[in-house]
Image (cartoon, grey):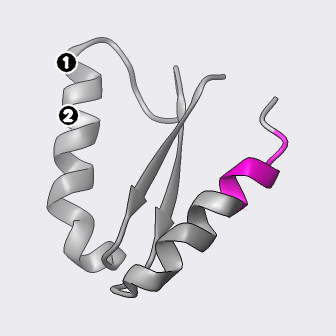
Amino acid sequence: MPTIVFPYRASAATAVHLTQAFRLGLKETGFAEGESLAIEYRLAEGHQERMSALAADLRTVNWQ
């Protein structure tokens, strides 16, 4: 299953509107989370300095 990574510098609570819009856009183009693709959420919880660590983590994931 294809995986999309959704990095965001804020918390899940503040990203709700963005993730909802993102999923809606995917649905409008024929994709559905958990059915035709997976979404990995990487949130920095408001700590900008965590973004580079989140990006580094993506390089170590074994994407199958």
Quick one: which residue is furthest to the top in this view?
A: 30
Task: Tell me where residue 27 appears, x and y as whole percent.
Answer: 27, 24
Quarter occupied by residue 25:
top left
Would you say 21 lies left or right of 12 here? Answer: left
Which residue is found at the position 73% from the left and 49% from the top?
59
Mark 2 — residue?
24
Task: Tell me where residue 20 appears, x and y as whole percent.
Answer: 21, 49
Q: Nearer the viewer, residue 59 or 37?
A: 59
Judging from the image, what secondary structure is the residue with disc 2 in? Answer: helix
Which residue is found at the position 24% from the left and 67% from the top?
15
Q: Amino acid at mark 2?
A: Leu
Q: Nearer the viewer, residue 9 or 32?
A: 9
CB under 8 Å between callouts 1 and 2?
A: yes
Quarter occupied by residue 17:
bottom left
Mark 1 — residue?
28
How many numbered markers are drawn? 2
Q: Amino acid at mark 1?
A: Glu
Report the predominant secondary structure element of the magenta stretch. Answer: helix
Task: Tell me where residue 19 appears, x and y as whole percent.
Answer: 27, 52
Would you say 55 lies left or right of 12 here? Answer: right
Q: Residues within 10 Å of mark 1 (few under 14, many from 20)?
A: few
Magenta residues, as a range?
57-62
